[in-house]
Image (cartoon, rainbow, N blue to C red):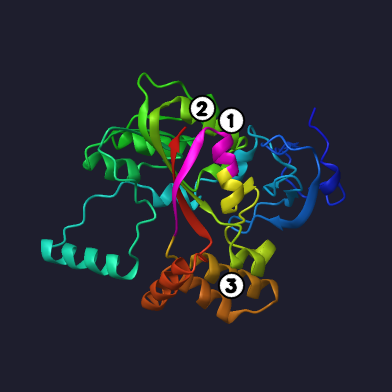
Amino acid sequence: MTPPPSQSAGALGVVSTPPSIEIEDAPCPLGCPRDDRFVLVATDRLHHIPGRYPVVRCAGCGLMRTNPRPTPETVGIYYPENYTPFASTQVRPPQHRSPRRRKLLRRLRRLILNVDPHRLPAVAPGRLLEIGCGAGNFLARMEKRGWDVAGIEASPTAAESARRAGFVVQNRRLECAADPAERYDLVAGWEVLEHLHDPVASLRLLARWTVPRGWLALSVPDAGSIDFKMFKHAWYGLDVPRHLFHFTLPTLTAVLRRGGWDVDNVFWHKNSKNLLVGLASLGRDRGWVRWPSYVEAIGNGQRQVGARLALGAVLGWLRASGRMTIWARRT
């Protein structure tokens, strides 16, 4: 039997959900007493699958979460075959650019962005696990750098693509994955932690799979950013109900610590997509027609690429891009 919604969100409920979705009420994963404050209610803006989902904030620790939420067994309906991360992680054949052009492009990227959102700590190649590896393009990059790579991916289609590319990938949810034969030196997860139903238990599992003082690299949307405060239910990083948790730096640090990890470094991505797509969504909500599509095209890198990069550089410098990467070490 599905538990009833929490008292803080129960008045709003969850309406118009697909018949195959089961809903659960989940407490704060940090073990705080049940005292949630309603923040907002939002819908799936990426694929427009029905459902209205409340976001609440724990009065004890401040961690925000989507609650009530789909169960682990039924949330898959919100991850259709055309889910963007599955397509964007395909392993592509190498592009035949001249060495001079490759060098120039690298210089331009360093000059404008000065950061790679998938940049990793300075650690010698060893054993690497990527959680939520999609179709495997990051695994391919790291294998070329000398890493012994493996992945875990919940999507059968994406996992099969990664396997066809030659990688060892478990097609399971993280909590159901088999223990590795050897521990990992590094675990990476790019915008994955916010999708997990129990981030603390998942982090403890990853710590158990990692060598002493091993590394963890995670990127997540930053709900402490100004664009979340501006756009609220229209914030691009919200993405309910796929995103079950909405971290700020303090709440993410607390979750990592409870999961067995010490934060080593943090940087904010030099990316303007959250801001631009949020502006477009807010414009559509207000009935505007033309400029939201134009602004969204800029956010997606289809127009005004130079302006988009410059804006992203400023937002990253101000720690206001709405996306952050944390490096942590196992305690």
Assess disc 1: are there few (<14), some (14-19) or many (≥20) residues with their C-alpha within 10 Å of its C-alpha.
some
Q: Which residues are magenta?
A: 254-268
Q: Residue at x 40, y 52 (%)?
A: 88
x and y percentages locating residue 299 in the rendered image? 48, 69
Examine the rendered structure and indicate whether residue 89 appears above or below residue 232: above
Q: Residue furthest left?
A: 99
Q: What is the secondary structure assignment of the residue under circle 1? A: helix
Residue 267 falls inside the magenta stretch: yes
Query: Residue 72 at x, y = what percent?
Result: 63, 34
Residue 15 visible at all = no
The residue at the far top in this view is 181
Q: Residue at x 59, y 50 (%)?
A: 250
> Mark 2 = which residue?
205
Dividing the picture into quadrants, the one containing residue 270 is: bottom left
Label 2 packing within 10 angstroms: few (<14), some (14-19), many (20+): some
Query: Does 76 sit left or right of 150 as displayed?
Result: right
- Closer-to-camera residue (79/271): 271
The x and y percentages for residue 133 are 41, 40
Q: To which residue does mark 1 refer? A: 201
According to the picture, the residue beneath numbered tag 3 turns out to be 280
Secondary structure type for disc 2: helix
